Amino acid sequence: MLHDTSFAQLAKMMPALASWTAQKNRTPLIMGMDELRRSADVFSIELLDMQHSYRVLYGEDVLSTLVIPTRFHRVQLEYELREKVILLRQGLIAASGDTTRMWELLLRSLPAFATLFRHALLELGEPATSSKREAVEKLAAKVGFDSSAFLQLLDIRERKSDPKAVDVNDLFARYLKEIEQVTAAVDRMLDSAA
């Protein structure tokens, strides 16, 4: 969090940030304090997650006192689910049957969907879950979808299962189908709750 996000201030930080990113760390997210407060309503998913699990490395703990309005949480959730489904389809087409690229897409997309599933549960009045697996299983029970593709992918991500023993086309087909089903079910449930 910065008090000054001007070009001049950012330019002063660039040498330190270049070293940081050269070590394969992500480029830091830089926001001003007022900007953070004023955007808390449109970044409710991200900020609620940050409040749930964070560590202050230096300076003021701005998250502990940040008020996150949730009036747009449902809208952001639906937007994110729909956007990620569209991006998943685009990625599948771009992969053009290349199994390596398909695996990368599946494994890279899973954490984002698990996060959104956790937030769907929150919207449906369920307590926060701490694990991806728990979020998938609880939402599957609540919405009634087949979680096997997600659980299989989680096993592969956690190195409990060998991807070579899995038909990536079959897994991708089931994964995409269930994500589309979840998106539609969450949309209907949240619309009826509004």
Image (cartoon, rainbow, N blue to C red):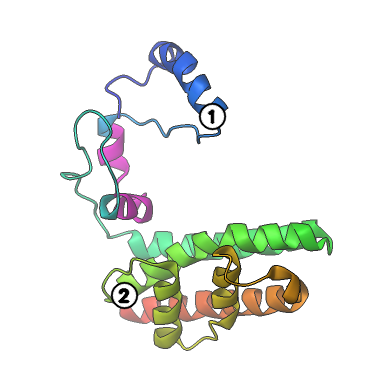
Residues 24 and 122: in front is 24
Residue positioned 53% across, 28% down in the render: 21
Sooner in the amino-acid sequence: mark 2 or mark 1: 1
Which element type, helix, strand or loop, lies under badge 2?
Answer: loop
Secondary element at tag 1: loop
State left or right for residue 130 relative to residue 103.
left
Count of number-bearing discs = 2
Magenta stretch mostly in which secondary structure? helix
Q: Does any portion of residue 91 appear in the rendered image?
A: yes
| Residue 85, percent from left and from top | 60, 65
Left or right of 92, for residue 175: left
Residue ID at (84%, 64%): 97
Query: Is residue 146 depicted above or below 194 in this figure?
Result: below
Queried whether the magenta region covers residue 116, the answer comes back as: no
Expressed as whole percent of the image width and height from the top left, the position of residue 110 reads 55, 64
**Circles 2 and 1: CB atoms closer than 8 Å:** no
Image quarter of residue 156: bottom right
> For the magenta stretch, what is the residue range?
35-50
Mark 2 and mark 1: span between their CA atoms?
Answer: 46 Å
Residue positioned 31% across, 70% down in the render: 122
Q: Quadrant of the C terminus?
A: bottom left
- Residue that label 1 marks: 23
Name the residue rendered at 30%, 30% in the picture.
Answer: 1
Q: Quadrant of residue 5?
A: top left
| Viewer-nearest residue: 92 or 100 | 100
Horizontal side of 155 relative to 133 (left or right) equals right
Q: Nearer the viewer, residue 186 or 54?
A: 54
Residue hosting label 2: 194
